[in-house]
Amino acid sequence: MSMNESRKQQLDGMLQQRGAGAFLFWRPDELVLTLGYLPHWGISFLLYPRDGEPVLFVPELEPEDILPAGIAVHTFPWGVLDGPDPWEELYAGIRGVLKVRGLHRLPLSFTKDIGRSAPCRMAGEQAPLPPGLCDRLSLLCLGGYIETDTESLYTVKTPQDIAALEVTHRVATLAVRTFYRNLQPGKTEAAVAAAVEAAVQEATGSEGVDYAKAWGLVQSGINTAAAGRFNRSTGKALAAGEGVLLELSICINGYWADITRVGQTGQLPPVHKKIVDIVAEAQAAAIESMRPGVAMEVIDERARRVIRAAGYGDHFAHGLGHHVGFRYHDPGPGLWPGSRALLRPGMILTVEPGIYGVDIACGARIEDNVLVTEDGYRILSDYYRDLTI
Amino acid sequence: MSMNESRKQQLDGMLQQRGAGAFLFWRPDELVLTLGYLPHWGISFLLYPRDGEPVLFVPELEPEDILPAGIAVHTFPWGVLDGPDPWEELYAGIRGVLKVRGLHRLPLSFTKDIGRSAPCRMAGEQAPLPPGLCDRLSLLCLGGYIETDTESLYTVKTPQDIAALEVTHRVATLAVRTFYRNLQPGKTEAAVAAAVEAAVQEATGSEGVDYAKAWGLVQSGINTAAAGRFNRSTGKALAAGEGVLLELSICINGYWADITRVGQTGQLPPVHKKIVDIVAEAQAAAIESMRPGVAMEVIDERARRVIRAAGYGDHFAHGLGHHVGFRYHDPGPGLWPGSRALLRPGMILTVEPGIYGVDIACGARIEDNVLVTEDGYRILSDYYRDLTI
């Protein structure tokens, strides 16, 4: 995949407006949203200048076959025994490109913020970024540094992004089906989660799927009461007649979905069945109101009103939804009280009302990913949403 | 688990020596090595002052049952709809404790470096740290900020740490056995990896295992040639008579192992068998030389000499080993050329010679985790190390 054309236009406009000489993108999700490239090691850098072609800097050890097509690639010697300091080579390389293009007297723009960004393919540890990376990068240009406000890059998806996310949801269907099929008394929450994650990873190599990774978090029975505070899988075995909640984050080729389902191992206790029905009704009411121009707080209120009317207003203590696609949680204003931003075509938001409480000894949430279209909405995760399949 | 006593003595000495008023630990692996506590959300902070008892700051949404015993816990309102700015509450809380103890005129010491640190339990995204966290923390004390050189906290494990790591290796045994049992032609690399990861997650809730997560990276046949540059699992199916390499990182309750094995789907090609034998010989030669007082470069050279003598010196382009236990890769001087540091009791190092090459169309590495004892060594990963089981 070569660089996303509509993204390029957006970046060019932002550079002009801010008077920066170039953007430097380094977080894994930034490389996905610009190049469709999820780095292996997490230490790749896209230099996107206001004049001339962009350059991608990658460590020598990066797998060649995952590099994006149609862009100049420079390597730096990270991971080489007895080589020079790889980071000095990288800094010199970036400075060199900017100097040749006469852009080093303008500020370099990037973000220092790492919170909530997506992991690279080597998700078992933080990427091997050197101490003081951002401080060093901010001194590369005579023109200094300005912060990149990246929010607008995340909140509206391009047609290419949406096509990539459809692949993600195709694989997520397998994950959700595997969840329902594993709802057997005696299995532990962790075993159900393991089966869900395995179903996703096994899709690696299927059509259009180069990298497939999921995190499944499964809570059953009394443990669902905490699902509004945290999600996790414990060694508790599922019992008969219990509700079971799956919180799923899934990354296919760098593109993310965030889905919640509630299933059952048999007839649910009445209160649990009741809150599942309320949550489903609240979700439907919210989604039906989604179209361009509607304020986000209005969508939130649609769901919140249903839950409040049913007497569970205090049991829904989180926002209704957030942007999703390049991360588990994309940044930007979302569906919550007081959020005045308007829905726009190309936005993808989670819609995830929930009711939870120790007093009712249970909890439920249903979460879907909804694309705002020109004249309404489309549910990208429109599969398996009932208590059983 | 309450706070590690020998770690406390070490921290007290370090604070005196550096003239700091308190340490602030926030990276997940720092919380494990001080408190044996792996945070769920990854936004917990241990304030360890030179006078008085330490205080642990955690977000309100943190699960209570994973909090360490025997320490004062303060919460801040992260994740609460319509609450105050949670980070201002946290900063005020830290400053308040330091002021009451008269320590706010001394520098606060912490590390800003996030590279290669361990993920928290919510490993599907970077912890939700706010922008500018470290800059804000560095302004909390009138005495300013000094960097913590944390290396010495990682390099020598306490008896408590070693006991915890023995649990990790007990679970890792299951993972490695699952790997060998799945070496069937037709299965994809990703499917074998998924089975290994599932076996680990399914151990959640077994004796002493609260949290269990693994990353298995499986390369087969020609793909093993790249295993010195990167490890990953693709959709390639295993063929008959192939070598298969497993790179495994595994985290049990916050304690990590890093293991590599080579198996086979049937009789290996002669050159692949040959390099496996050389690597095994090199590893044995290195491990046998491990005891307190020996320089790290000497251990590296023991292995490198065997590989060089066999004619594959150029095919072993990485170091022999690194510290391990609180992360996939603990910091500190390791087993590589020019590393003059001496082995000390309590160190745990990987020993992982390898031979890889496109010219030989294959690669092999065997990796174990070796504890340096008072009079020699003990292999913590002393299980299943041959081509078949």
Image: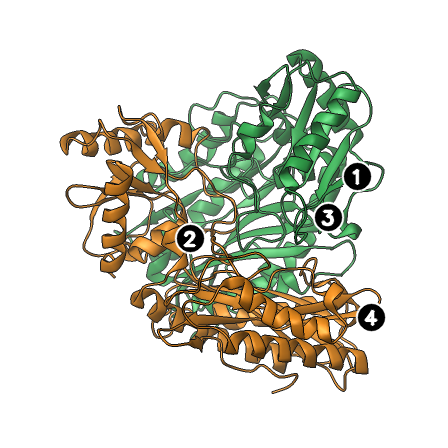
Chain colours: A green, B orange
Q: Position of residue B276 (x, y in %)?
A: 69, 78
Q: Quadrant of residue B229?
A: bottom right
Q: Is residue A370 left or right of residue B333?
A: right
Question: Which of the two discs, 2 and 3, sits closer to the camera?
Answer: 3
User: Could you classify mark 1 by the number of other residues whose Cα lies within 10 Å: few (under 14), some (14-19), or many (20 or more)?
Assistant: some
Q: Residue at x 43, y 65 (%)?
A: B343
- Identified by mark 3, the residue type is Glu
Compute the Cα span from label 1 to label 3.
11 Å
Q: Picture quarter containing residue A148? A: top right
Which secondary structure lies at badge 4? loop
For disc 3, the chain is A
Amino acid residing under circle 4: Ile
Give the residue at mark 1.
A73
Q: Nearer the viewer, mark 1 or mark 2?
A: 1
Specify whether residue B197 is in view.
Answer: no
> Residue A231, labelled with which disc?
2
Tell me which chain the residue with mark 2 is part of. Answer: A
Work out which quarter of the rendered image holds the N terminus of chain A and state it: top right
**Of B227 and A176, the residue lying toward us:** B227
Q: Nearer the viewer, mark 4 or mark 1?
A: 4
Determine whether, in the image, residue B371 is placed left or right of residue A284: left
